[in-house]
Image (cartoon, rainbow, N blue to C red):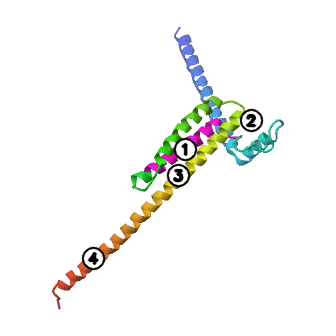
Amino acid sequence: MLASDAFLVGSLVFVAVVAVTVVSAAYLAWRGARRRLRALRRHTAVRSVAALWAVTRPGVLAVPLLGATRSTARARHELWRAVGTAERAVRHAAVIDSPVGDLPSLTRRLHDVGLDLDGLLAIADGLPPALPEVRSLRRQVDDVVQASDRIRHAALAAAGDAAATRAALLVADADREVRALAAGVARARDALPRVG
């Protein structure tokens, strides 16, 4: 009985080792294949061929309309990136006491319109990009992004003027302080007794 028990235990251990080896080898092969596939997808030639195929396949416009190739997720990302940069620009301009006029209320309106468009883009997710409603929605996103750029440029101009004034005052004060310090050091040097 002892020999058959030992044989049974040995057989079970052997089967377990073989199973673990097979599972590990399959896992490593799967990871390697996945890594190679990802590298292949990122290759410029493959992406170029895929883009060419997407543009020239039957039933697709040869030259896509502006914004018609963007996914709704990308449009949402661009929308919120534009809204966020405009809000940060106006907030920074206000912090450094530059004249911002009505820019803060414009950024609030921009944020509200962004919320509206974000909801509509979420609804349009998965719809064909060639639909007139989806194209119109993407044009609205482009308009909001352009408005955001205009707000950001205005805030930059206002903040740039304020910063230039502050920088000029700082340079003048620094020059005055350096001259005063140099004069003080020269007087202190003259006041020291001469040795020799």
Q: Which residue is mark 4?
A: 180
- Residue 133 figure quarter: top right
Q: Which residue is mark 3?
A: 152
Where does the image place residue 70, in percent across and percent down from the top left? 67, 40
Q: CA distance from mark 1 to mark 4?
A: 48 Å
Circles 2, 1 touching at the beta carbon (< 8 Å):
no
Q: Residues within 10 Å of mark 4 (few under 14, many from 20)?
A: few
Label 1 vs 3, first from the N-terminus? 1
Where does the image place residue 97, in percent across and percent down from the top left? 39, 55
Q: Which amino acid does the dot numbered 1 rest on? A: Arg
- Whether 128 is drawn above or below 165: the answer is above
Where does the image place residue 179, in percent across and percent down from the top left? 30, 77
Q: Work out which quarter of the rendered image holds the C terminus and state it.
A: bottom left
Query: Which of 13 and 155 lies nearest the eye of the viewer?
Result: 155
Label 3 vs 2, first from the N-terminus? 2
- Residue 185 figure quarter: bottom left
Q: Which residue is mark 2?
A: 130
